[in-house]
Image (spheres, grey):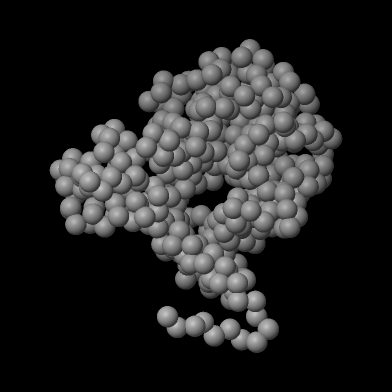
Amino acid sequence: MATVQVPVGLDHDKMMNFAHHVVGDLAAAITGPLLYIGDRLGLFRVLADSGPLTVQELADKTGLNERYLREWSSAMVAAAYLDYDPKPQTVALSAEHAAVLANENSPVFVGGMSQMIPDHYRLLPQIMDAFRHGGGVAYEQYSPDVFEGTERLFGPGYRNFLAQQWIPAMPGVAERLAAGGLAGDAGCGRGQALMALAKAFPAAQLVGWDNHAPNIAYANEQARQAGVSDRLRFEVRGANDLPQHHRFDLIMTCDCLHDMVSPETCARSIRGALREDGAWFCIEPNMADRLEDNISPIGKMFYAVSTLQCMTCSLAHGGSGYGTGMGAGNVERVAHLAGFSRFRKLPIQHPLNQFFEIRP
């Protein structure tokens, strides 16, 4: 075996440990497209429903090519996503792993994130051009995978926790909605947060705003199909241009303030739309104010997606470009600049998000 030649002064063990670390990251990165394939082709769902299968049985159930499935499943076994029994040569998805990869209603489901990966690779030339010349990549250049993936990533949290735990953490807000209050969602995406509130508070009046018209068309159709369109509607409207009539009991921004061209202008718009006793419920990535406090797998993921999506979308329009590392300190500063006087980080434990109650 050849001996690794180490330049004078380098720590051999440190170098090799880092090399293994980077190889692990590269292996994870190249596995991402296979996660996308397993999610989009329904392979994880089939395995969750069927129990252990040979690759041929998986091919028979899905109608997909056996040779491709054999290589895909081998990669998933090597990555420890699937279990493998060598005697019958079967692969299986455990119940615990199915909660992460196959169950769309599970609070730990991550299929939405894997759905977003191909766009991040596809747009690398444009992002690299922004590295050279400034500017960014606008949301209009991303495919439906990003918008649907975002919906699927955050939707389980809204369905499992928004009305049950998060809204009740703010005194009086749930009671106001139950009594027929008015709530809005700025940057609502495909509308899942308000759909969850519509089911939990049948007397509430709800309106969502987003400047991406396909999101709004989809959300309105979902409200119609759910039979709640008489009290839940969605409008094509930017978050900087909310109705300034001080009527809303609650306005939400769900994982989107850091994406805004101008979070400061958005905050002022929210201030003008809220009642004097209303509340702004702000969800943001679970990132600290200082880089040294974000050296973790969560920080690694959020800074990466910020570079490839969140920050660049803001900079594409000459915006602030806060990115996912906006941090609680910047959220509080933006709120105070907009005229809010009360700012509180809510005592909600969540691996990906932090939650703020902001009041006039």
Asked if one can make out residue 240 in the rendered structure from this viewpoint, the answer is: no
Quarter that holds the N terminus: bottom left
Residue 98 relative to residue 274: left or right: left
User: x and y percent of residue 16 in the render?
Assistant: 56, 72
Total marks placed: 0
Residue at x 74%, y 42% (from the top left corner): 268
Residue at x 66%, y 34% (from the top left corner): 349
Asked if one can make out residue 69 in the rendered structure from this viewpoint, the answer is: yes
Residue 172 relative to residue 255: left or right: right
Residue at x 41%, y 30% (from the top left corner): 222
In the rendered view, tell whether residue 209 sits above or below residue 226.
below
In the rendered view, tell whether residue 221 sits above or below residue 3.
above
Q: Nearer the viewer, residue 19 or 173?
A: 19
User: x and y percent of residue 52 in the render?
Assistant: 26, 38
Q: Nearer the viewer, residue 99 or 257?
A: 99
Q: Quadrant of residue 54?
A: top left
Q: Nearer the viewer, residue 67 or 17?
A: 17
Taking the view exactly as shown, the residue that stands out farthest to the front is: 1
Taking the view exactly as shown, the residue that stands out farthest to the top is: 179
Taking the view exactly as shown, the residue that stands out farthest to the right is: 341
